[in-house]
Structure formats: C-alpha cells, structure tokens
Image (cartoon, rainbow, N blue to C red):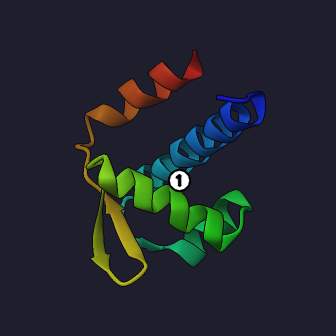
Amino acid sequence: MQASDELDGLSRAETQKNVLLVLIEMGEPMSSQDIAKHINLSVNAINIALFNLNNKGLVERVSRGVYKYRLGPLLVPLLKEFWKG
C-alpha cells in the first residue's frame, strides 16, 4: 500500500465518523444532501461514506438517499468519548 492510499483511507474513515456523528446528533433520517450541508463536504463524499457505513451495519437506508443510524442512544456518549482519542 502506498502512502497516498493510506492517507485516502484515513480521510474516508474521518468522513465516515463525521457522517455517523451527524446522524446520531440529529436523531432522525437524513438525506446525503442534508448531511453534506452539516459537515461541508460534497454529496459524493457523503454517499461513499454512507455506502461504507451501511455495509458495516452502522446505518440503515430508509429510502433512496436517506439514511438513519442503527445504534442505540446509550452508545452516543461512548462513541464521542472513544473518538476523542
């Protein structure tokens, strides 16, 4: 794996984390366009993150382009603490 591939992977992981946090904080299904507005990224980047999060079982597709998180509310503080580092 080249250094640029590793950086790409880190960027994707950060985007996925941010997308998941927005879905958790909003507490309701959101479109990729709405998520993109919240974290100031392209809709394409959000769609890639949602695709990966869906494959990991962390979000659920509600309808075309609309997703919600699948984690219980008790995990929200744990995730925030975990991601603080």
Residue 25 to residue 30: above or below:
above
Q: From this viewpoint, is residue 26 visible? A: no
Between 55 and 84, the one nearer to me in the picture:
55
Q: Residue at image x 39%, y 76%?
A: 66
Q: Which residue is mark 1?
A: 19
Counting from the top left corner in percent of width and height, residue 35 is at 57, 66
Q: Split into 4 quadrants, where in the image is the N terminus?
A: top right
Q: Residue at image x 30%, y 70%?
A: 61
Between 66 and 75, the one nearer to me in the picture:
66
Counting from the top left corner in percent of width and height, residue 85 is at 57, 15
Q: Residue at image x 69%, y 41%?
A: 8
Counting from the top left corner in percent of width and height, residue 74 is at 25, 34
Q: Is residue 12 left or right of residue 28?
A: right
Q: Amino acid at mark 1?
A: Val
Residue 8 to residue 75: above or below:
below
Q: From this viewpoint, is residue 59 visible? A: yes
Q: Residue at image x 30%, y 33%?
A: 75
Between 46 and 3, the one nearer to me in the picture:
3
Label 1 Cα crowd, 10 Å radius (few <14 / some 14-19 / many 20+): many
Q: Is residue 24 left or right of residue 57?
A: right
Q: Is residue 23 left or right of residue 17?
A: left
